């Protein structure tokens, strides 16, 4: 069976950069996304499916696991979105929250048998600085913090199998998705840029670079970590000149 | 309008100890719980199925019509032990439904009154498990999420004079902990061997932290997580 990398979330600029980078390193990429990805993306297979349909997701993942031995899993799911603390109704949050926490779990469950068999696995979750607390982003903060806790919990549970689990937390990224998300919470990339010590936006390639390392065999002793690729944004509030 | 402190899940364990402590401090409390309060519990009780969002919303709204909610302790929670492979959508949904949603509802209902008062104290009960615990995917994720909510709300509501903090209890001698670690179960000994103090915490020791955050004098502390864990978090990198 073909060894492959499963990438959840390929229609974003980050997803495209990840696919391109990892394919150039010789990985076979399979993508999963609710939307269409760039048809030029060098992927082996691109699956499009609704990400809140529990049964369909499980069936599709099971089918993929019959064709590929996934030893690498990249989790780049869509955000919960911005909005004031009183903006989202309980029912909506309950449904969206459950869907966005379960999706990474469903992907992990699908790839675990192959990773166990290979006694090797690399799991990497893509998150952002919004988990640390920003006005207008409490829901997104909850989602990100959940994924960071998941990285820690999964690293403990899977460490004995040769599987590493980490999270890559981005700062203010120069991408369509990042700008859209910040706007939803009533802020802007420009506003936040003054807090970035390195005085520039993150590029999706900066994230792909760090991801490439964390997914490599060389990164064999790093697990349960949240790695901030943020230009220093998360160091503090004194970055402004 | 009389001020009130809302405590969710105040009939057992940590919640019960918090209600008792707040009463001793002179606060009027409202305990929202599906089970009846212990005998002799002070304050208001509203029988509420907190996993029913509509019911919870209407109970909170009625309370807010009669009292000014200036303090909230989001304590209700649920735990689903099990390996990664067994964590189903239903389990995650239950965890979100009880570990997140009543907290969001309580905040949303109380927020206009807190803004008007220019004062509010919110304490969210997270868990040390947010720092990682094997065979607790749904629990550690949603309890980590509670820390995220805490930091998000803290940053957003700081200007309004509302503080939001979290407590991360370690193994506390409650029905919940004893249920997942019954006496004689090797898991119980294993967990306690990881606690530098070599004992379970008492619910009153968590209530101590809650009372501190809820105090009107604790006004410059927000967005923080206090682990009440017998030292179990020592040596760990905090989120």
Image (cartoon, rainbow, N blue to C red):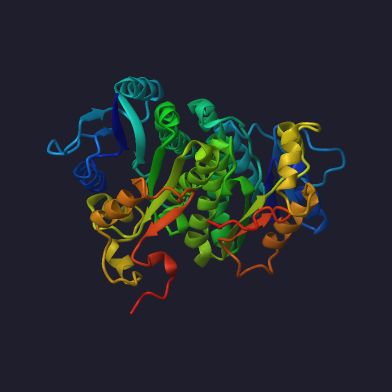
**Is B50 on the left-hand or right-hand side of B20?**
left
Instruction: Name the residue: 27% across, 51% down.
Output: A208
Q: Position of residue A95 (x, y in %)?
A: 45, 33
Give the side of residue B34 with respect to residue B53, left or right: right
Q: Is residue A165 above or below residue A232?
A: above
Q: Residue at x 33, y 51 (%)?
A: A213
Where residue B38 sits, quadrant-wise, is: top right
User: In the rendered view of the protein, which quadrant contains the N terminus of chain B?
Assistant: bottom right
Number of labels in the image equals 0
Choose top left, top right, bottom left or bottom right for residue A61: top left
Is residue B15 visible in this depiction of the protein? Answer: no
Asked whether, in this view, residue B72 is left or right of residue A34, the answer is: right
Direction bottom: furthest residue: A241
In the image shown, does A54 or B149 lie closer to the viewer? Answer: A54
| Residue in the foreground of this view, choosing between B37 and A110 | A110
Q: Position of residue A38 (x, y in %)?
A: 16, 39
Is residue A81 visible in the rendered image? The answer is yes
Residue B231, compared with residue A25, is above or below; it is below
Toward the left, the furthest residue is A40
Q: In x, y percent, where is residue A201?
A: 26, 63
Q: Nearer the viewer, residue B188 or A173?
A: B188
Q: Nearer the viewer, residue A231 or B207?
A: A231
Q: Residue reaching furthest right?
A: B40
x and y percent of residue A226 in the render? 45, 53
Residue at left offset 62%, top offset 32%: B81
Determine whether, in the image, residue A119 is placed left or right of residue B96.
left
């Amino acid at each position: 069976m073909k060894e492959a990398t499963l990438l959840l979330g390929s229609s974003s600029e980050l997803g495209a950069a990840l696919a391109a980078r990892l394919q150039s390193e010789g990985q076979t990429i399979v993508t999963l996304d609710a939307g269409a990805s760039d048809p030029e993306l060098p992927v082996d297979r691109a699956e499009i499916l609704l990400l809140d349909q529990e049964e369909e997701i499980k069936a599709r993942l099971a089918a993929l696991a019959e064709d590929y031995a996934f030893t690498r899993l990249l989790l780049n799911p869509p955000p919960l979105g911005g909005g004031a603390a009183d903006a989202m109704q309980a029912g909506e949050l309950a449904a969206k929250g459950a869907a966005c926490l379960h999706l990474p779990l469903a992907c992990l469950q699908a790839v675990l048998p192959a990773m166990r068999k290979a006694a090797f696995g690399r799991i990497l979750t893509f998150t952002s600085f919004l988990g640390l607390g920003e006005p207008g982003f409490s829901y997104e903060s909850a989602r990100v913090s959940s994924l960071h806790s998941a990285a820690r919990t999964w690293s403990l549970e899977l460490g004995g199998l040769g599987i590493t689990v980490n999270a890559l937390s981005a700062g203010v990224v120069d991408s369509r998705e990042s700008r859209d998300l910040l706007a939803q919470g009533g802020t802007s990339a420009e506003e936040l840029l003054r807090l970035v010590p390195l005085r520039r936006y993150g590029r999706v390639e900066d994230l792909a670079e760090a991801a490439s390392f964390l997914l490599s065999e060389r990164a064999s002793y790093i697990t349960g970590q949240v790695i901030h690729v943020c230009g220093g944004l998360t160091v503090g509030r004194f970055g402004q000149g | 309008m009389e001020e009130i402190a809302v405590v969710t899940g105040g009939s057992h364990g940590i919640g019960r100890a918090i209600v008792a402590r707040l009463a001793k401090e002179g606060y009027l409390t409202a305990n929202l719980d599906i089970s009846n309060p212990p005998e002799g519990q002070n304050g208001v009780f509203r029988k509420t199925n907190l996993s029913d969002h509509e019911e919870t919303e209407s109970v909170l709204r009625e309370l807010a019509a009669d009292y000014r909610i200036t303090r909230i302790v989001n304590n209700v929670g649920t735990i689903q032990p099990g390996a990664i492979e067994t964590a189903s959508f239903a389990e995650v949904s239950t965890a979100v439904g009880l570990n997140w949603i009543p907290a969001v509802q309580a905040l949303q209902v109380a927020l206009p009154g807190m803004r008007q008062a220019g004062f509010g104290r919110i304490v969210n009960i997270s868990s040390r498990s947010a720092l990682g615990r094997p065979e607790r995917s749904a629990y550690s994720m949603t309890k980590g999420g509670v820390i995220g909510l805490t930091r998000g709300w803290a940053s957003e509501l700081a200007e309004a004079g509302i503080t939001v903090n979290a407590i991360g209890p370690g193994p506390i001698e409650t029905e919940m902990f004893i249920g997942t670690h019954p006496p004689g179960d090797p898991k119980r000994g294993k967990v306690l061997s990881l606690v530098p103090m070599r004992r379970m915490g008492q619910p009153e020791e968590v209530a101590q932290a809650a009372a501190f955050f809820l105090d009107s004098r604790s006004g410059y502390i927000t967005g923080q997580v206090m682990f009440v864990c017998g030292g179990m978090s020592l040596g760990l990198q905090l989120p």
